[in-house]
């Protein structure tokens, strides 16, 4: 069930059978010479939308701009500062909690978001902790590549050159979903290098075409389909387990 | 051209021929008993995506959560506080300006956003004004219903009961784009009442089903199609005019 | 009744008969070659002080610095950023609400304030909306030129060259109240031009003497007196209507 | 010279002969059973306006709401939080510095403002200090009761029962300036008690009528006149000395 | 009793016999050619740790970075902006109040901290004042040099050349506690000059070696011992008096 | 070399031979029935102070309060919100960068700090990234348990019951450094349970004595000594490698 294609009355009814919602969250940032700028928010969106086809889970609109300051050296990247990101995650959560959602599940598509999302969770919990009261909601962060089976599948599909940015697995997912937007170039080197992550100017100097450790040429729509199907299944399981967890008295 | 389906290299190339970008911006909020929660961000997205089919304009990802605090009494609404909204618009703008975009066009789908978007513009300009330097970018807010021809067409389509929230025109637009998500109920009263806009509890007490002054039963996919086509044309014109405006020396 | 010339005990007594207060709010900013820098906060102050001569309404001290970033290219302008303005309106409102004021009426004298004041209202209401409780107060923004009769009178007095900044009507109001501070120059052109409003450097380049669309030479103290008397009457009516409006249960 | 009764062109001219401006700053807060709520912002305003009659100094509009959280238990008090106060003083200063003012003199009327004003100065200077550059402006805080001669005169006028809040000296100043707003009651006790300053509920419990250590019955318009005349003279001297101080290279 | 060397269970037990805690607070900043960078946080730490040897008082970890923006021109200084400082003091206080501490005593070692600490107190109290409720805690600021007997002793030890920064008394305290870190130089001039405190560049230009009005050559470990012993005794008395003060009903 | 026991002139000299500084950073929070509240900031402090005995590295004062909101259910815990923590790390970094430090190494002692420290780094880098300029400094986060050899040694010392909070390894470190503050109880169960980390009330309900997965009874001062010596050696290596890394042109 997609929240944005529902009415408020339908959500009111949903809340009678579940207090759990899934937010696809990612980033809009460069993904090397062939990866789409939307890759990191489209991957969790694709997976979450696929998952709700077969299961009664509720998917919020996609939180599409994340923490990508280090990619700002490449045109098209849009980034929030961590402080803005924390404020926005706070307002999303407060809105949903006001409606009675108690389990808020963030399906994340960008490694660079993790620290700021966890900081946002702590910022939210701290309100309750300082006030010595229960928060009234539980927050969960889950990267799509950590869903059950994905790591094995990706290692199987891409034994070398997977890397950590503009990876063939994330590019495969978008190739399956957006076949008309597949791009190709000759990569040089075939597998990109690695390095520490600092400010944008430093990042672009270290990674001239934007990739980190990856060889995106190995991606294919079919591999993307396999990843999406397995991730959708894993997501349903994770959400079910989270939904069943008891809230503290 | 859709930014999220492009690579950074394609955007770098685009910047050689234009410094203008369009951001669809809206809100995710209740739209009465039949309107979709995503209506206000989907309308500008639908129109902007349609417009770029026929013209060389660049569309950013959709800014889908806006200022909707007064709708929080209805499940599914997600709102940013104005201060968060201002911070986020600031970071989007700073990101795009860092790439060299000089004309940033916000195509808005939610009346409740207008004040906060304008405040965000002033917050951004103020940095330059305090520092006695040019801002380096020009910001423009345009509501889709203010695009050329739309007001006349909507008055023609819906001579009575258009209202200001959950209007038949916006619902028609989403009906055309998402025909499988058309909902219907018996409205009572047929045309909803009006009132001042304050906090959420007050709003829900005044507007029990969420509508303000509207009769959404008049919406149809065909009327939506007419609105989208005219709006897309109007958008191309507006963007072209904005693009041609000289930047201050 | 002027709050700043009252004691706390007198205000405590006033609260037994009314829960409504009027805050004159404006801006301190350039008003062309002859307009006073204080014009935009003095106009609502003059009108509100006049209104309380004949009616039992309570006037707060004047909120004299507003959002005027675009005028910072002209010496003497003092501006708050929108974020500061929102914070300050918040603290004024929280202070008055703590005393039991339930209807807070902002009589505004500066068009550039409108967006930020409305954003401030939403920021305040959002606290209640996220917490699912009534706000306990209602906020109203009213520009003095929107008071009953003023638009007609101004059109009658100044059929051409009224414009939108450094207008003959606002200058007339200050001429009546501060006759010793009347200034004059030869305007060139007689009626100033218009343009979009962006950062200060851009504004000064477009409007070399600070006016927008106006011919202030038409102002006179007598026209000012007529405007003040009509506006004072209109204010009493508006405040009375607001005061009578029931608060939500 | 009063800034709010001047045009921008007059301020531009003033800046050619002086880079110094005086901001009367105070608070709007309870002043015991007979003191006016505006006492603390009216005193520095009265003195500063008097001073500019005889000397070529420039007076900004009055900053009339300060840090008075401890008085919020008494109706009519309006307070900024320190964080808001710091932000607002920052924007005033940035605005004036943008015009070329280099010496900004705050004539203060409220003891409770001192810490927050000094914190605001440090916040402003810190921008330059972190950036290893000169600030470009010097800020000075001066309480009107610290102006030359005032302490001796007040001790002479009020050998006992001066106290520190709702003092006979500040009430005398407002009596001279606003003779129609003189109030009187029987004080009990004649001289009020003292205590630590904490939150508003605590303050009102300790000081039931709002006074701290004072006997306002000793105030008279004539004593007020003497204070204003001496303070105005002292202010001119202080401003002159500040104006002459060299700016760091 | 030192909090950081205790377990939570020991603190839980302490709270049954006292609701008071002491926080040593200072600054890490240049202290002239021979003073240690840690002087201002080590002095209150040394005194507080000494005091708890002989009395049942609880000492929190030391708040070691304060407001020292004016010293940033000298390497090794670390400063918080006032806004950060206020936020941090807020979180320390909220943490301790959540555990039931009702009397929070800040033993301060840096004059430059005073304004910001008091602003922080007001920021915390304002939450309660706006909400019309008791704060639940009382905050006290006490500089170690204001403890009973210290002023007389310091005047006796250093009749001339005490000054206000890098004073012989504070340097003596650190000499007693850290005898291996005693430094010496020839001072020129023997007694340093004074001046206003503004941004860092201005400060360093006025005070080339960092001292203000002081002759640190007079410090000795023995004088430090005398100061520490007297201050520790004074602290126990002050804390006892604060602890005994009744909380408002 | 300890910064707080140095003079500014000594730091000025140090900067001629190195641009690197180490900040011990931790948290003050409950560590089970026997762990000291200061454990998480004392461990990195102990290791860093040990390391500088044998190598020419510079150690800043300890950043002793971190992000520990989940431990606020246990008395003695003091926590910053992530937003405050980010602001404070920002000011520490800006201060040090102003002096010319280019490599700032945070030696961390608390797992709960990691996300907020990384968010703080991104917040700092983002300033440079939005402005399209180099940051001028590189930031590095290193947990003391990730220093070379520590993981193997701890597994060897504590093959079972190490856990993740109130671990025998961290308690051993403090036992070695503070032998007079060793505490003991009978643990029940011997090895504590695990669970998700949310707000404080939830945490205390899940972990009644504060431990997570650990059996602190295995700690001993001798094991602590081994850990400190190995960590000190590892730290010197890490700092050396970081110091040698070239800064981007």
Image (cartoon, coloured by chain):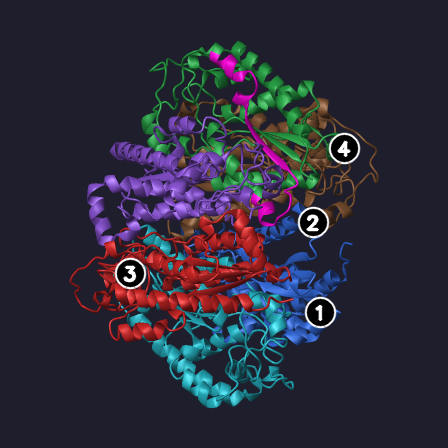
Chain colours: A brown, B green, C purple, D red, E cyan, F blue
Q: Which residue is mark 4?
A: B16
Q: Which residue is mark 3?
A: D176
Q: Which residue is mark 1?
A: F15
Most foreground residue, F199 or C153: C153
Q: Look at the numbered discs 4 and 3 and tell me whether their residues touch, using CB distance below 8 Å.
A: no
Is B206 on the left-hand or right-hand side of E225? left
Marks 1, 4 in one chain: no
Q: Which residue is mark 2?
A: A197
Please, which chain is the residue tagged with disc 2 on?
A
In the image, is residue B140 part of the stretch drawn in magenta?
Answer: yes
Q: Secondary structure at mark 3?
A: helix
Of marks 4 and 3, the one in the foreground: 3
Q: Rounded to the nearest whole Å, what is the CA distance between mark 1 and mark 4?
A: 44 Å
Of marks 1 and 3, the one in the foreground: 3
Q: Look at the numbered discs 2 and 3 and tell me whether their residues touch, using CB distance below 8 Å.
A: no
Is D173 on the left-hand or right-hand side of F58? left
- In percent of width and height, residue A19 lies at 43, 33
| Residue lying at 28% horizontally and 71% vertically, measured from the top left | E244
- In percent of width and height, residue F82 lies at 52, 52
Q: Quadrant of residue D218?
A: bottom left
Q: Rounded to the nearest whole Å, what is the CA distance between mark 4 and mark 2?
A: 29 Å
Q: Rounded to the nearest whole Å, what is the CA distance between mark 2 and mark 3?
A: 67 Å
Question: Which portion, as a residue range, is magenta?
Answer: B126-155
Of marks 1 and 4, the one in the foreground: 4
């Amino acid at each position: 069930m997609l929240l944005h294609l529902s009415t408020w009355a339908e959500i009111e009814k949903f809340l009678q059978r579940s207090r759990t919602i899934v937010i696809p969250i990612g980033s809009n940032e460069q993904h090397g010479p062939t990866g789409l700028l939307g890759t990191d928010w489209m991957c969790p969106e694709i997976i979450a939308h696929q998952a709700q086809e077969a299961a009664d889970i509720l998917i919020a609109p996609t939180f599409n701009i994340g923490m990508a300051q280090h990619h700002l050296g490449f045109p098209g990247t849009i980034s929030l500062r961590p402080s803005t990101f924390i404020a926005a995650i706070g307002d999303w959560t407060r809105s949903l909690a006001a409606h009675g959602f108690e389990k808020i599940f963030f399906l994340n598509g960008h490694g660079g978001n993790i620290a700021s999302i966890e900081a946002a969770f702590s910022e939210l919990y701290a309100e309750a902790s300082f006030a010595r009261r229960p928060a009234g909601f539980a927050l969960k962060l889950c990267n799509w590549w950590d869903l059950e089976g994905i790591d094995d599948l990706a290692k199987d599909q891409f034994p070398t050159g997977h890397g950590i940015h503009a990876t063939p697995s994330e590019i495969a997912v978008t190739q399956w979903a957006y076949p008309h937007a597949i791009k190709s170039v000759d990569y040089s080197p075939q597998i990109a290098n690695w390095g520490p992550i600092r400010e944008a100017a430093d990042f672009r100097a270290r990674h001239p075409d934007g990739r980190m450790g990856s060889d995106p040429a190995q991606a294919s729509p079919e591999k993307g389909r396999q990843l999406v199907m397995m991730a959708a299944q894993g997501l349903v399981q994770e959400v079910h387990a989270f939904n069943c967890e008891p809230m503290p008295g």
